[in-house]
Image (cartoon, rainbow, N blue to C red):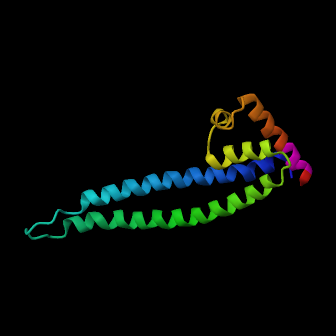
Amino acid sequence: MTIEEIKAKLKRYRFIAGEISDLLDERERLRSLAEKIIPSLSFAPVHGANTDKMAPVIANLIEVERYIEKRSKELLRARVEAEQLIDRLSDERHRAVLKSYYFSRRNWQDVADALHYDKRSVLRFHGWALLEMVKMS
C-alpha cells in the first residue's frame, strides 16, 4: 500500500464524520421548518393548507434520517478499518497523533496543543507513522 492509499483510508473517516455533521444540521433545519408549519391548536376549522406544505418537509426529514443511518454504518466501518491500521503502529506517540487528527477532526495545531507537542513534531510523527504503515503493508 502506498502513502496516498493509507491516507485515503484514514481520511475516509474524517470525510464521513463531516458529512454526518452536515446532515445532522440539515435534519435540525428541517425539524425547525416543520415546527413552523404545524398549525397552532385552535377551535377554528382547519382546511388542510398546512398539511400540503408539511408533507414534503416530512418526506425530506425522513430521507435525511435514513441517509444519516446509512452513513453512520459506513462511518463505523471506516473507523474500524482506520483503527486496525493505526493500532499496528509500534510508537505510542504516532498512534496518539493519528487518532487525535483523524478521529477527533482536529486541525494539526489543535492536535499539537492537545498532545502537548509543537506542530512540527506532530507533523513529523504523522509522516513517520505513514512510512511505518507502508513498510507493514
In the rendered image, residue 30 lying in the magenta stretch gets the answer no
Residue 36: % across, % down: 25, 56
Residue 38: % across, % down: 24, 63
Residue drawn 63% across and 35% down? 110
Please name whichever residue, 72 or 112, is drawn nearer the observer in this view of the structure: 112
In the rendered image, residue 131 lying in the magenta stretch gets the answer yes
Q: Residue furthest right?
A: 135
Residue drawn 52% across and 64% down? 67
- Quarter occupied by the C terminus: bottom right
Please name whichever residue, 54 or 66, is drawn nearer the observer in this view of the structure: 66
Q: Is residue 105 above or below residue 55?
A: above
Residue drawn 74% across and 60% down? 81
Q: Is residue 21 above or below residue 69?
A: above
Q: Residue furthest left?
A: 44
Q: Relative to residue 19, is residue 118 drawn left or right?
A: right
Magenta residues, as a range?
A: 130-135
